[in-house]
Image (spheres, rainbow, N blue to C red):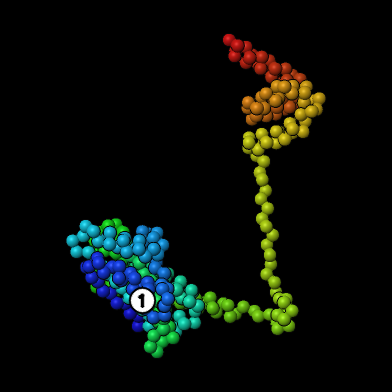
Amino acid sequence: MFFVEARYHRDPSRVGAQVHYISHREEGLAGGQRRELFGIGERYRALRGDESAIRKALRDDARGLRSPVFFRFILTVDTKAAERFSRLEGSVSERVLRDAIEKTFRGAVRGAQGVFSVHQHGGFDRPAHPHVHALLSPRFENGMAVHISPERIQRLRERWEREVLVGLQRQDRRLTLLRELPVPPKDEQSRGRITRTPATLLPTRLVRRTDGQLDLFRIVRRRLRLLRGDGWTRQMLPLSRVAARWDQNPEQLARRVVFRVASRALPKGLRQALELLRGLRQLDRRR
């Protein structure tokens, strides 16, 4: 049976000692080592385990409240779950507990904020005793004073048990898949060769599209660079005018070049009509 112990006090001066306890004091730590503090809620997650900043934030949350309430939780697992945790690596076990505690508070006590620490030292008749110490702020994330009823604490215990078991089942499936992977023969292992090698994917090659005015402008600019010294180019656009207009407005110059090249392919009658229209347009501009 999973167990959740909930206690509370109303003294902000005790907050510093409690944060120090869940981070430093318990079995398995010596020489000034400490357990990492994780945040509940966006504000305390942003503190990134800074112990002094966490103490200050908890005391600041108590200001303005006539009777601030600091809830402290100890969340443990049963013996069967502890045996399953003992088969996992320490980092994997900690990740399962972190995911479970975050989902538990988010689902059962939405809006709660504070800090927690994961403990995994062994106990009496147990190879491992994974549990979590959590200390909540006296305010919810929206600024309201914290009040947690016994019914909500019971829902928190049920949610904690469900999330831990789901996390353990996920890790059990992962271990089962690892055991079912084919093992290469011993002679192949000794030679450093594996009979079944994973297929490697070739890098994806991006194909550049050449549609749109900007791409057309780039193509015409490259063509002009190649043809700038040709006599046909000097006949279409004198080099002095090309250099001057290229510095002023290269895109407009490219459009004019495309138009002139296309117009030269038209029949004589259509070319004369276009020249007439250009002359009328120039007369309107002069007026």
Residue occupying the far bottom of the picture: 125
Q: Quadrant of the C terminus?
A: top right
| Whether residue 183 is visible | yes
Q: Residue furthest right?
A: 231
- Image quadrant assignment for residue 77: bottom left
From this view, report whether residue 209 is shown above or below residue 255. Answer: below
Residue in the image at 70% along x and 24% along y: 242
Packing grade of label 1 (10 A; few <14, some 14-19, many >=20) is some
The quarter of the image holding the N terminus is bottom left
Q: How many marks?
A: 1
**Residue at horizontal 22%, vertical 68%?**
10
Residue at position x 70%, y 25% in the image: 243
Compared with 277, 231 (above or below) is below
Can see residue 267?
no
Between 34 and 72, the residue placed more toward the observer is 34
Quarter-of-image position of residue 190: bottom right
The spot of residue 34 in percent (x, y) is: 41, 72
Q: Quadrant of residue 46?
A: bottom left
The residue nearer to you, when weighing 31 against 124, is 31
> Between 108 and 95, which is closer to the camera in this rendering?
95
Q: Where in the figure is residue 11, as x and y percent of width and height?
A: 22, 67
Q: On the picture, is 287 further left or further right than 153?
A: right
Image position, residue 19 (x, y; %): 33, 69
Q: Circle 1 is placed at which residue position?
A: 25
- Identify the secondary structure beneath mark 1: loop
Q: Percent position (x, y) of residue 127? A: 44, 86
Q: Residue furthest front?
A: 31
Q: Is residue 273 above or below residue 192?
A: above
Please say if 10 is above or below 259: below
Horizontal relation, residue 1 to residue 167: left or right: left
Three-letter amino acid code at the position of disc 1: Arg
